[in-house]
Amino acid sequence: MSEATPDRVDQEQEATPREQRRDYSMFDADLSGAVLNFTLLGRLLRWIYPYRRHFFVSTILVLLASTLAVLQPVIISIVVIDFALRGVRSEGSIEFGMVDLTTWIQSVTGWPVLVAASALYAVVQLGWAVAIHYHRMTLITSVINGLRDLRRDLFTHIETRPSSFFDRVAVGRVMTRITNDVEALYELLRGFGSLIGEFVPFFVALIIMITVSVKLTGLLALALPVMAIATYYFRRATRVLFRQVRQSVSALNQNMQENLAGLQVVQLSQREDFNHDRYMTINVRNRELETKSMKLSTLYGAFTDTMASAALATIVWFGGGEVIQNEISLGGMILFTRFIDMLFHPIVILGEQLNILFRAMASGERIFQALDWDEKIHEPAKSVELPTRLEGEVEFRHLDFRYDYDVPILQDVSFTIGAGEKLAIVGPTGSGKSTLIKLLGRFYDFDDNSVFLDGIDLNHIHSHDLRRRIGVVLQDFHIFSGTIYDNIALGNDSIDKERAIEAAKTVNAHGFIDRLPNGYDTQLAERGQNLSQGQRQLLAFARVLAADPEILILDEATASIDTETELLIQDALRKLTAGRTSILIAHRLQTIQEADRVLVLDEGKVAELGTHDELIDKGGLYATLHSLQFQETSDD
């Protein structure tokens, strides 16, 4: 891209030097997410903030559910076993008033104490189930809504990036940020709620156990550092391994997509066996990594089960002696056994959540990296308001342009297209023909005072206003999922079905559309695969005509159409270009000869400009290109 002219420097804040420093390779980097980034987490919570009430209610509910989860073993151990069955009530033990509550239920209902205790347990269990259910629902609601907004904002941001961005960044990388990386954040935020639900019982149970028996609590606490260390090293090993597994799965998917997308080439070149061997090589690598991951997980699971069993045996062994010596009650010892899982399970969950956290940090970096990418087409601070109808005069004045800073594409290009004129642009491949129309649509930035529309500098017109006045039919145009009518109207409310049908009739597309099963309501397959190439191009013509632009651009629009369809299109072109300024980039003689003038580009410069007959008589580059094509046509 060329340097900005002085009158545009303030507006763009010296954009060109900044863009020279852009590092697009970061979109291909495999971020580790090894650092806990609180700034990133803070930014993420901005999308959750509008749904903070749901998040707050979810937190309250999980605290309630955690408390009820602690009360359940207390009721079984202290109330049922000690109080109801053994008639013992230890002074000073923390039982949260469950014994008094059982006694009150017994006095009100007249039930036996065991029935009263069972009823209390049922109520607590039901309360826990209701609280944990609504905790999950409110948590998921707030998280899903917040990430929906994040995905919407990310999509909107990416959709407004300029063509220069997608020239250098693979679409698959961008899609991963909008889909997989946002999903990783969902797992992270949902996991935070689970951690709260795990660690509240952990600390409450620890306090109760210390109150019941300091000695048994100390014995059980000896296993906690061992569990923590084992969990740390396991997660450290699996973090690297899981990343390798994800990479191998990505390689499998990429290889599969590549083969399926080019299946006809694969079969024509008989590469099935070769491609199978390549796929199996990647598949074997994936199997080895998955197997290693499974072995580690199995080993860790066996270790935690062993530690839990050893802790249980310790409590039964030493606790049994404490019971015999009446130092603790039988219910107190059983309470210890019920709390073992409450002490060990949070450590295991924390290890799993750390893995999710590290993955989410990497995903968050990628997401905010994309959101912070400020590359865009520079719009005027105060855009010119265009008239209701343009005359359509286009002028290129000493235009210089380059995609890369050391590779010039267009050099000192100057010419004018009169209002309503039909100009054909020809030239060898790579001469800059398609670049010209991209600049006319302002898909790339260029210098001020280089391109004018009805005497107005294009850089003083907002790109949205400009593009509504320009209709483009590309050689490789896009068909969207939806009906025939949807693909003509493209969401423009001003194009009703009658207008779409009229446009289709004008470009000779109505005939094949009317023969489809549901006419204009026929659903199109992916990329319009249920239409022929010619039919898709006729549909593209109808799409442009329905929008009624003042400037019409056809980029190789008849390059791959059969002779019969070309006759239909040539007839449509005469109607379509009538009264419009038209730029035709084409190789076919019929299209070129019907143009008012022909512009010849060569190595980014204007080589020749004149009528077809004038350039033939001149005997220059156009005459050479014409003779070569005429020879090819004769040979056909």
Image: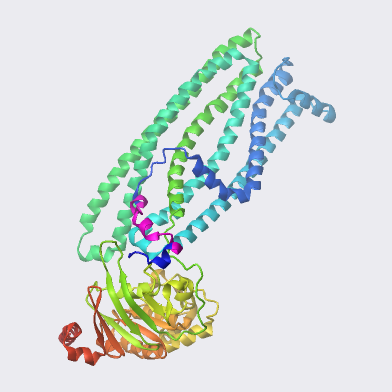
Q: Residue at x 44, y 25 (%)?
A: 229
Percent position of residue 343, x then y: 55, 26
> Of all residues shown, which one is farthest toward the top?
325
Percent position of residue 604, x then y: 25, 73
Give the number of marks.
0
Residue 337 is situated, as x and y percent measured from the top left of the image, at 58, 21
Say which residue appears at 28% left-offset and 74% top-offset: 412
Residue 63 is left or right of residue 484, and the answer is: right
**Magenta stretch bounds:** 10-27
Q: Is residue 154 above or below residue 506?
A: above
Q: Looking at the image, what colour scheme do you see?
A: rainbow
User: What is the x, y in percent for residue 32?
Assistant: 38, 41
Measuring 48% from the left and 72% from the top, which residue is drawn there?
A: 464
Q: In front here: 590 or 58?
A: 590
Along the line of sight, the residue nearer the viewer: 42 or 52: 42
> Which quarter of the figure has residue 427?
bottom left
